[in-house]
Image: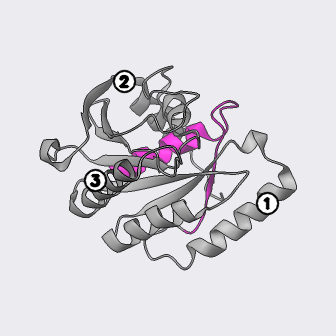
Amino acid sequence: MDETYTPEEIERGRLLFAGNCEFIAGVSSLAIMIPEGLPEIAFAGRSNVGKSSLINAITGRKALARTSHTPGRTQQLNFFEINGQFNLVDMPGYGYAKVSKTQKKEWKVLIRSYLKGRTTLRACFVLIDSRHGIKDVDLEIMDLMDEAGVNYRVVLTKIDKANKEELDKIVEKTEKALLKRPAAFPKVFLTSSDKKINLEELRVVVDLLTV
């Protein structure tokens, strides 16, 4: 992650998330999809990657997105209005083995339809566990985003728990893979919810994407 931001940009990002954060709707099917309006930023990631923890950390809320020791709890598209300026969309966690095949199929249909049909979707953050790197289930969601032409950035989570040498290898391997993907931002973003690493910078990126 080579990006640096000015104090003014960091303050804008802080103010963006310091305002009101309100749950709007949980959408489990296209039939009840909320109308398009504000710009949207989506967060995707396989179960247990730390998606809810990261969303709570950047918004400064303890329980905006539900966290659980049981993976796979996010089973719908959850929309949160942030400071009246954009909607944060918490996408269903994928890759959880104990979910039924029917449920997995329904999630995939919902995600594909949302990605292809949402003109207000500005970008998606694809969360990857920094200790494990990209898995096959991550490639599936990235394929969907490439097909839909949705800009996305890979965010490596839990970097405080990763071995430095192994992390460097994961970063190198991931960025090499991203160069081959038409809709992907070429650099990864390193984060830790627990240690609050690069949360300010992540807020700036969201702010710039929603202007």
Q: Earlier in the sequence, mark 3 or mark 2?
A: 2
Q: Where is residue 80 in the image (x, y as percent from the top left)?
A: 32, 33
- Which of the two residues, 20 or 128, is positioned nearer the viewer here? 128
Local packing at callout 1 (Cα closer than 10 Å; few below 14, some 14-19, many 20+) is few
Of helix, strand and loop, which one carries label 1? helix
- Contact? badges 1 and 3 (CB < 8 Å): no
Q: Disc 1 designates what residue? A: 168
State the residue in front, 82 or 145: 145
Q: Where, quadrant-wise, is the N terminus in this rendering? A: bottom right
Q: Quadrant of residue 136?
A: bottom right
The quadrant holding residue 170 is bottom right
Q: Distance between the residues labelled 1 and 3?
A: 34 Å
Distance of mark 3 from mark 2, alpha carbons? 30 Å
Q: Residue at x 49, y 40 (%)?
A: 203
- The segment highlighted magenta reads 186-211
- Amino acid, disc 2: Gly
